[in-house]
Image: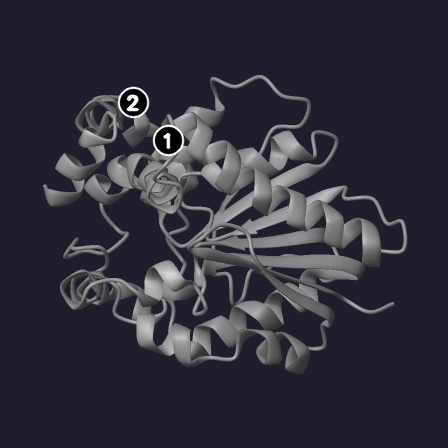
């Protein structure tokens, strides 16, 4: 409830958005999207974000979008509205991706996008809007999140419909060299180091030569995060079981070890970095 109250003070209609999801027909979509044969990694079965069932619950799925909106507002507290905060946070992220790909891809077009850990599809929709001629796939371990994403997508008209896949980002089962862009947005801080390494290696496998990987997440060099009060930092760590592992991992070196080149990291807002890299030709 604390997150809800804080969000609503920032004009995020947390309870109303949650209610709309829980009272919708999202449960019917769930059955068609869930892969009953999927084996969940052990780390994924831990409590996350104060949900005992982690991401495998309807409440977590229903509250995911307002929680995502809160990320932008916390990053840009001086923004006059949530839309303005989102435009800055997401706009800087998308621009970093586009600039990197234009510089290092050898004129390869972005025709196929994979959004790993897509949650309820917020980042996937931004990517699909930024690159409208591309075909986008949103992949996540939570069928609850994917059901919410798929239901929302049904109401949106776009050139290429987003495809939603219930799968593991460390072993997607998707064909090798089949994507031009792989994105992981706010995913890595929720994973142990071994899983982050697995995600990066799998991204390398599914990307075509000249393809781009992009990871955006908390920046260890963020002065805002470094200056959090001990109480707030302890509270954040209590709902993020792998935060220490994320901060200790050298993400750029992990990407180089996987085979990526042109690894670059920039602060795209006061809290978050975007790391981009290329699969060599």
Instruction: Name the residue: 45% across, 64% down.
Output: 219
Question: In front: 11, or 240?
Answer: 11
Q: Quadrant of the N terminus?
A: top left
Q: Which residue is mark 1?
A: 29
Instruction: Check if mark 2's residue and mark 1's residue have beta carbons within 8 Å.
Output: yes
For residue 25, the mark is: 2
Residue 243 position (above or below residue 38): below
Count of labels shown?
A: 2
Q: Secondary structure at mark 1?
A: helix
Residue 20 in percent (x, y) is at 24, 22
Residue 66 position (above or below residue 81): below
The answer to whether residue 38 of the structure is visible from this angle is yes
Report whether 105 appears left or right of 134. right
Residue 154 in percent (x, y) is at 48, 21
**Neighbourhood count class around disc 1 (C-alpha, 10 Å): few under 14, some 14–19, many 20 upward:** some
Question: In front: 169, or 221?
Answer: 221
Quadrant assignment, res 46 = bottom left
Q: Secondary structure at mark 2?
A: loop
Give the CA distance from mark 2 to mark 1.
7 Å
Report whether 176 appears left or right of 106. left
Q: Quadrant of the C terminus?
A: bottom right
Quadrant assignment, res 175 = bottom right
Instruction: Name the residue: 54% across, 33% down.
Output: 125
Residue 134 in percent (x, y) is at 72, 36
Residue sitting at the far left: 1
For residue 132, the mark is: none
Instruction: Name the residue: 45% across, 79% down.
Output: 194
Residue 63 in percent (x, y) is at 25, 38
């Amino acid at each position: 409830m604390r997150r809800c109250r804080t969000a609503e003070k920032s004009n995020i209609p947390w309870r109303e958005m949650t209610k709309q999801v829980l009272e919708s027909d999202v449960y019917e979509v769930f059955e068609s999207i869930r892969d009953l044969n999927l084996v969940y990694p052990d780390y994924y079965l831990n409590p996350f974000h104060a949900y005992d069932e982690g991401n495998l619950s309807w409440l977590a799925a229903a509250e995911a979008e307002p929680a995502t909106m809160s990320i932008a507002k916390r990053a840009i507290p001086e923004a006059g509205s949530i839309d303005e905060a989102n435009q800055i946070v997401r706009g800087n992220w998308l621009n970093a991706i586009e600039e990197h790909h234009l510089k290092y891809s050898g004129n390869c077009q972005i025709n196929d996008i994979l959004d790993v850990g897509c949650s309820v599809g917020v980042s996937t929709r931004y990517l699909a809007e930024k690159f409208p001629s591309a075909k986008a796939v949103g992949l996540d371990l939570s069928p609850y999140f994917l059901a919410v994403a798929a239901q929302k997508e049904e109401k949106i008209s776009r050139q290429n419909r987003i495809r939603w896949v219930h799968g593991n980002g460390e072993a997607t089962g998707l064909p090798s060299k089949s994507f031009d862009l792989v994105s992981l947005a706010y995913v890595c801080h929720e994973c142990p180091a071994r899983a982050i390494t697995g995600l990066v290696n799998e991204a390398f496998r599914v990307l075509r030569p000249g393809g781009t990987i992009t990871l955006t997440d908390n920046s260890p060099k963020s002065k805002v995060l470094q200056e959090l009060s001990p109480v707030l930092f302890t509270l954040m760590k209590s709902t993020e079981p792998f935060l220490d592992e994320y901060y200790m991992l050298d993400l750029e070196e992990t990407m180089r070890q996987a085979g990526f080149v042109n690894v670059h990291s920039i602060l795209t807002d006061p809290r978050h970095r975007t790391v981009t890299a290329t699969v060599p030709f």
